[in-house]
Amino acid sequence: MNKKSTAIICAYNEEKTIREVVSIVCDNFFDEVIVVNDGSTDKTDNILNKLREFYVFKYIKFDENNGKGFAMATGVENASSEIIVFVDADLSNLKEDHLFELAMPVVQNESDMILGQATETLIDYSINPFKSFTGERAVFKKDILPIVDKMKSSMFGVETLINLYYKSNGKKVKYVMLDGLKHPTKFDKASILQASKEFLKEGNQIILTAVKNIDLITKSIKNKISI
């Protein structure tokens, strides 16, 4: 590619999938790979240290969990490329084609942000009300830098914040289907009780992020009316 790109993988207790995800990303076209270990308490750290014997990537480790938004923002601050591709650490069946489909529309200036939708999910893409919350996305670093500080405190509301910011600024957003990619639900990764608690916690963080950024919502509405 004629533009440099950085892949950012943020992980918290993803010992089951982190090896596959990091290996595939490092084997591909990225000029730089950054892995942020957000205070994992399982074997994620051991696996990543072992992978560093075979792959070159920048490893950032937190002693305690700071939240997804903080981890993503830290990755952005440490990225040296003009294009950033975020890749979740809990994916299965990740392929080279998925990474190209995410990055190329931004590289070719077809869009300001690409949102990748895994096809192997519980809810069909065409009716999925949560598709804009996807962790698979490609952006220009210059576009996302202005909200890095806000990202740090957004926790699981980080995708909501990014979406609101792009919409309020009239940025072009494009969805791409990542055929065969599997993204687990919380019920795949935890008990029904624990998964339900996580859903409630994340829901609260998303709502709080929206409330804190009501100015972006207002700006988006005004932009739509003016059009």
Image (cartoon, rainbow, N blue to C red):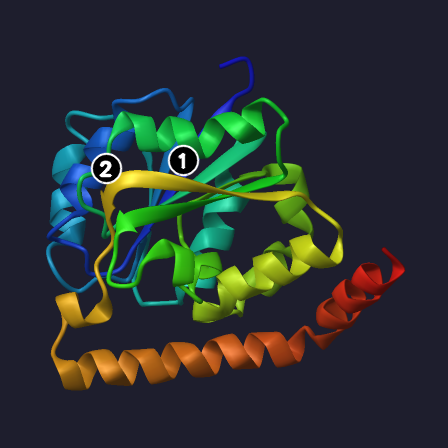
Which residue is more in the foreground, 82 or 111?
111
At 52% across and 21% down in the image, what residue appears? 4
Name above or below for residue 63 compared with residue 101. below
Which residue is more in the foreground, 96 or 153?
96
Which residue is more in the foreground, 141 or 177?
177
At 54% across and 29% down in the image, what residue appears? 105
Name above or below for residue 202 compared with residue 42. below
Q: Is residue 150 left or right of residue 76?
A: right
Q: Secondary structure at mark 2?
A: loop
Q: Position of residue 99 (x, y in %)?
A: 36, 31
Q: Is residue 164 something that shows in the picture?
A: yes
Q: Is residue 59 left or right of residue 47?
A: right
Q: Position of residue 146 (x, y in %)?
A: 69, 51
Q: Is residue 128 left or right of residue 95?
A: right
Q: Secondary structure at mark 1?
A: strand
Q: Quadrant of the C terminus?
A: bottom right
- Nearest to the eye among marks 2 and 1: give it: 2
Q: Which residue is mark 2?
A: 94
How crowded pointer 2 is (Cα within 10 Å; few <14, some 14-19, many 20+) is rated as many
N-terminal of the pair, mark 2 or mark 1, is 1
Q: Position of residue 173 (x, y in %)?
A: 60, 45
Q: Is residue 56 something that shows in the picture?
A: no
Q: Is residue 144 left or right of residue 48?
A: right
Q: Which quadrant would residue 65 be assigned to in this image?
A: bottom left
Which residue is more in the foreground, 31 or 123?
123
Q: Which residue is mark 1?
A: 7
Q: Position of residue 50 (x, y in %)?
A: 12, 37
Q: Which quadrant would residue 215 be assigned to in this image?
A: bottom right
User: What is the residue that sits farthest to the right in this orientation?
Assistant: 226
At 20% across and 61% down in the image, what residue appears? 13
